[in-house]
Image: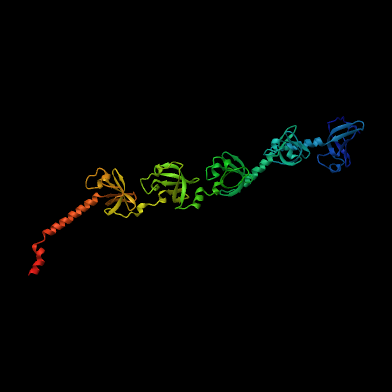
Amino acid sequence: MDFEMKKVKVGMVVEGVVFHVTDESVYLDIKAFSEGVIHKKALTLEEITSCKDICKIGDVIKAKIRRIDNDDQQILLSRIDILREEKREKFGDLAGKSTRIKAKVKQVTRGGLVVVHEGVEMFMPTSQIDIKNINPEDFKDMVLECKVIEKDYRKIIVSRKRVLEEDLRAARQAEFETFKLGQVLEGKIVKITDFGAFVSLGVIEGLVHISQISHHQVKKVTDVLTEGETVKVEIIRLDKKRVGLSMKKLLETPWQLYAREHKVGDKVTGKIIRKMAKGMLVEVSRDVIGLISSRDYSWDPKTNLAGEVEVGTEIELQILSIDIEARKMGLSKKHLSYNPWNDVSVKVGEEISGTIEELQTKGALVKIQGVNAFLPIGEISLNRVDKVSDVLKFEEVIKVVVLEVDKRGWKMVVSIKQLLDQKQKKEFSDYLKTEEKAKQTTLGDLFGEKLKEFK
């Protein structure tokens, strides 16, 4: 029988037939000057208790020559490199696919993690460990779920970050589908920006825009909120997996709060914030602004309250009306004082007494029933009056006739002249009646009784 002996060298891959197996070693006929021996640790990538668990007599095995011992006439073989390369090819084919593997961290290096899966070493760059900033040392000896993302002739690159991103997207989708407009949730503020605050609702983060934080104007978010704070929010927008939140919708408005403590008729203090042609705006509480119309400045229509105060001045007012929904409030200054014209009962043409209160160039003010009536200079006398003080005296009691009464306009005009003229006309009328009667009287009318007695 022909026999051909192979020339062998370290690193050569050979194939042989198993002719003997023990717990610790496998012996192969590789047609060389000596048999090939594979010890248990070089037989497989997994942990085994006996070589008999892996192979049996007659199996054909491929292995790589690790060492040639000429003195002991022994060729040491190993299947590790071959098995690793096979698995490298197998795992490399997973690059870009959805398959996930579990790998144990073997070593932490400067650039990332060396991980092992089924005996094959792979590399996980630091940037592919997590979706947030981490310390690679924290992952030492851990088993990580990852995906193969790249393979070249030197190494296989894996990513745990890709797995986390996929899981996060799936969790976000599932959570997003549970949300409804108007739903009230509780969450923690995880980030504050100039335009609002991001609130963690679980997996998804929603945005509370700065305009939705409070019913009051917020100039700086950090003046109101802090990171880590737990807040209640309402979902007001669901758009392309983005969640818009509101805090202020769960809060009573400044008007609702104010209306709970105040009612129509209450006396309140407010600050004038704006003057207008027909009224003034008054802030009675933060962001609660009422209007005092010019007609409610005073009972006296000649009084101009707007001319007596400045913007920023605090004044006392009375609430006339409150409309919470429309955010309107009517205020009044005059209703805090008594209107003396309510007691005025005189009528036009009525004769009445009054007291001189003030002498003026064009007439005099006469106190009648608690209010001032005006006596024009032309109505003081039947004769021409050049100077009021020549005819009237302060606190003098006079009789006048009422020419005009306007209680709403706080106006009453009286006259002495008209009263005198009326009296003169009456006296003249009485005189005429007396004269007529005298003309109709005879001697019989005058001496009729005497004649009867004489007879």
Check the image and report above or below for 158 versus 421: above
Q: Is residue 90 left or right of residue 54?
A: left
Query: Residue placed at 71% from the left, 40% from the top?
Result: 146
Name the image quarter holding the C terminus. Answer: bottom left
**Nearest to the observer: residue 399 or residue 117:** 399
From the top left corner, tell me how far across and down residue 161 is, in percent: 69, 39
Residue 4 in sight here:
no
From the top left corner, tell me how far across and down residue 175 is, in percent: 62, 47
**Nearest to the observer: residue 334 or residue 126:** 334
Q: Is residue 266 left or right of residue 169?
A: left
- Colouring of the image: rainbow
Which quadrant of the figure has residue 111?
top right
Residue 331 in sight here:
yes
Name the image quarter holding the N terminus. Answer: top right
Which quadrant of the figure has residue 65?
top right
Which quadrant of the figure has residue 86?
top right
**Nearest to the observer: residue 66 or residue 352:** 352
